[in-house]
Amino acid sequence: MATLHLMVGLPCSGKTTLARKLETKHSALRLTPDDWHAGLGHHYGYNMTESDESLHNVRHDAVESLMWKVAARVLVLGVDVILDFGLWSRKEREELRCRAEELGADIKIHFMDVPEKVLFERLRNRNAHKPDESFVIPEAKLKEWIQTFEPPLPEELA
């Protein structure tokens, strides 16, 4: 039976680093939205306007929707999938859990629980040495996102 691996955590928590290791360990398909955005020429940075951010959010939803279609097909074929989405809300995680169960797949949540101080240190390093497949993230955005993040409950991780 295939397993859907859900990477849960904020930016700079180490989700993609772990996802890459799991990809090799499980011979899994890793789906990371930043990779697709970069490949499509979408960028996120310091100079984004509200309009730019709104467009990015619409694109992001479309990218994740397409990724799920690919993931669902791959799970049905019996191959593990890693969704490196962040999954900040319990509602998102529960929705994906139900979808995976409908396909007959197992689910495993990998929660990257990193102290805020470490997140900001990693963010500064990321922004200073931005790899091609990642985006510059203003510190104010990370502060905003920390407030909206819903850590997994113990029963989600069981």
Image (spheres, rainbow, N blue to C red):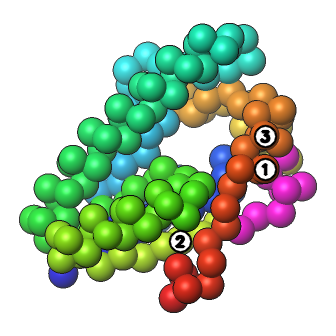
What's the amino acid at mark 3? Glu
Measured as percent of width and height from the top left, residue 74 is found at 17, 58
State yes or no: discs 2 and 3 in contact (Cβ < 8 Å).
no
Amino acid carrying mark 1 in the image = Gln
Residue on which the image places disc 2 = 110
The earlier-in-sequence mark between 2 and 3 is 2
Residue drawn where x is 21% and y is 48% of the image: 70
Q: Nearer the viewer, residue 5 or 151?
A: 151
Residue type highlighted by circle 2: His
* Residue 126 x, y percent position in the rendering: 72, 37
Q: Secondary structure at mark 3?
A: helix
Give the residue drawn at x 83%, y 32%: 140
Judge depth for marks 2 and 3 and give the one in front. Answer: 3
Q: Earlier in the sequence, mark 2 or mark 1?
A: 2
Question: Which residue bears the numbered disc 3?
Answer: 144
- Region in magenta: 113-120
Q: Is residue 81 left or right of residue 6?
A: left
Residue 64 appears in which quarter of the rendering? top left
Mark 3: few/some/many CA within 10 Å (<14, 14-19, 20+): few
Residue depicted at 82% across the width and 42% down the height: 143
Q: Is residue 108 above or below residue 138?
A: below
Residue projecting furthest to the left: 77
Q: Residues within 10 Å of mark 2 (few under 14, many from 20)?
A: some
Is 114 magenta? The answer is: yes
Q: CA distance from mark 1 to mark 3?
A: 5 Å
- Residue 17 placement: quadrant: bottom right
> Which residue is disc 1 drawn over?
147
Q: Is residue 35 visible?
A: no
Q: Secondary structure at mark 2?
A: strand
From this viewpoint, which residue is outermost toward the right? 117
